Amino acid sequence: MIEIRGNDGCMAGEKLIRFYRTKLSNYNLIYYFMVPNIVSFCLTMILCTAFPVAFGLAYGIDGLWLGIAVYAMLFILLYYMFIVRKARKVLWKRYRIRDFQKLQQLKLCLLRNYLARNGFHSSEELMVLQQMIEEDNTSLTKGATIKNTAILLIVLLFAALGAVFILEANPEGNRILLTVLLAILVVVSAVVLRGISYVFSHVIDARKRNVMALLRDMKELRASYVAQQNTEYQPYREMEVVIQNNDILREIIEEKAFF
């Protein structure tokens, strides 16, 4: 069994996370090959903002809402035409796979081959690597706990302030009304704060998401090794053929070792 200790283990974990984020990202596998379509889509949607503006100037506030509805429908239609349909064509043209579920299997197979090339050929060896990455990233979980606690404290502060107003309200009917309003305020505040937290996390916590996704995929690979040892099932046989017939995918596996 492989043991990873000290600073070498930390550096290996960072290199593996970087490999997972860059080489196995959807951008590297799909969207890199369709940059002109993405640029065309963005420019088209900028030009389409003329619709809500024109409707608003012509018909007032009602026209503005109509223009926004038209813009939303155009966004969905053009997103499918420029992005989704093109992405499916890229998947078929470059990798001979037809849907995005197969893409996840391809990522897992690439990761499996890359880890095997670096000496991790079994469920037990992957467990050692997984534990090392988890130990190096315990601060990420602590950060998420602190953030959730802060959101809870803010919501409780709103509730406490509302409770003060309810206790001072008179007569009884006003207290009932204010209690209902307070409940609505607490729910809305929790939803809004959660949404803001999600947007903030999406921008700031990109590394955390990559680490969590990598650990999840490693657990699935460990399960595949166990299944392969105990049965005749070969979970990535189809993807192995795809990789062997594709120069781009073979180059990804032959990426410089993370040790």
Image: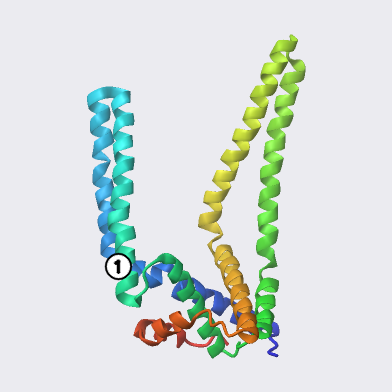
Q: Is residue 250 shown above or below 70?
A: below
Name the residue tied to disc 1. Answer: 89
Q: Nearer the viewer, residue 207 or 27?
A: 27
Q: Position of residue 41 (x, y in %)?
A: 28, 54
Q: Quadrant of the C terminus?
A: bottom right
Q: Residue furthest right?
A: 167
Query: Which amino acid type is shown beneath numbered disc 1?
Result: Lys
Q: Nearer the viewer, residue 106 or 6?
A: 106
**Number of marks present in the image shown:** 1
Q: Is residue 77 shown above or below 159?
A: below
Q: Position of residue 161 (x, y in %)?
A: 71, 27
Residue under the point 30% across and 31% down: 66
Task: State the image quarter where residue 1 is shown.
Answer: bottom right
- Snapshot colouring: rainbow
Task: State the image quarter where residue 240 is shown.
Answer: bottom left
Residue under the point 70% across and 83% down: 6
Residue under the point 64% across and 23% down: 181
Q: How many residues crowd mark 1 within 10 Å: few (<14), some (14–19), many (20+)?
A: some
- From where the camera sits, is residue 80 visible? yes
- Disc 1, SS: helix
Q: Residue furthest top?
A: 171
Residue under the point 71% across and 34% down: 157
Judge from the rendering whether residue 53 lies leftward or rightward of residue 127; answer left or right: left
Q: Position of residue 44 (x, y in %)?
A: 24, 50
- From where the camera sits, is residue 11 visible? no
Q: Is residue 63 shown above or below 202?
A: above
Q: Position of residue 68 (x, y in %)?
A: 32, 35
